[in-house]
Amino acid sequence: MPAICRSIKNNTMTKYTLPHFGQISIQNLEEYYDVNIDFKGNEIQLDLNFENTSIDATQLDKVKNFLENIEKFDTQNKTYIIEDYHDQDGDTVKSYIELHLEEIEQDQLKKLVNFDDSTIRPEQQLLKKLELVRVGFYPDSEDNFAILDYSIGQDLTDYLVVINTDENGQLDYMAMES
């Protein structure tokens, strides 16, 4: 086979198409890719982060699977968030909620919390307002595969409830970060 044909053939073999990101060259990766998408009526950021300049396609298959199932993983994470809030030993979500109820003026929180509603506590109302704002993928990292950030509103706060998962969406750990 002439060199030019071999080069074209090899070039097409090194492309991988990911939902939302399009084609990525698996033999010549950039360090960072990002895109914003509509998710349940809100704009969220998706980003890909690579430590190396090449990756095996099977790792990108895991990213593709995760991207195709973001809604399922979001639902699962909301369960983790609620469980952490109700767990006596869990402090991440409680700390996040309490911080915002204490530090943000009621006037600013009125968009999220009806302080006059005696049937549901402000903490519970704010808990329901945590929404996915970012999913970061680290397919060649040994520490994290996906990091999902949740916020009550990025216009109100820089603090996030951050959920680290494996490629199957299973919780590794949860933290509050800013």
Image (cartoon, rainbow, N blue to C red):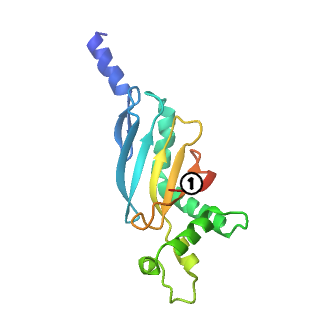
The residue that appears at 48% across and 54% down in the rendered structure is: 70
Q: Nearer the viewer, residue 177 or 24?
A: 177
Q: In which quarter of the image is the N terminus?
A: top left
Q: Which amino acid does label 1 sit on?
A: Ile
The percent coordinates of residue 95 (x first, y second) are 61, 66
* Left or right relative to 36: residue 58: right
The residue carrying pointer 1 sits among few (fewer than 14), some (14 to 19) or many (20 or more) residues within 10 Å by Cα, namely many
The percent coordinates of residue 78 (x first, y second) are 56, 64
The residue that appears at 54% across and 74% down in the rendered structure is: 102
The residue indicated by pointer 1 is: 163
The residue that appears at 28% across and 16% down in the rendered structure is: 5
Where on the picture, by quarter, is residue 77? bottom right
The percent coordinates of residue 33 (x first, y second) are 37, 41
Q: Residue furthest right?
A: 88
The residue that appears at 45% across and 64% down in the rendered structure is: 157
The percent coordinates of residue 60 (x first, y second) are 47, 37
Where on the picture, by quarter, is residue 99? bottom right
Where on the picture, by quarter, is residue 98? bottom right
* Left or right relative to 97: residue 136: left
- Secondary-structure class at tag 1: strand
Q: Which of 53 and 71 is in front in this view?
A: 53
Q: Tell me: residue 19, above or below residue 97.
A: above
Q: Residue furthest left?
A: 4
Mark count:
1
Q: Tell me: residue 172, above or below residue 59.
A: below
* Left or right relative to 11: residue 78: right
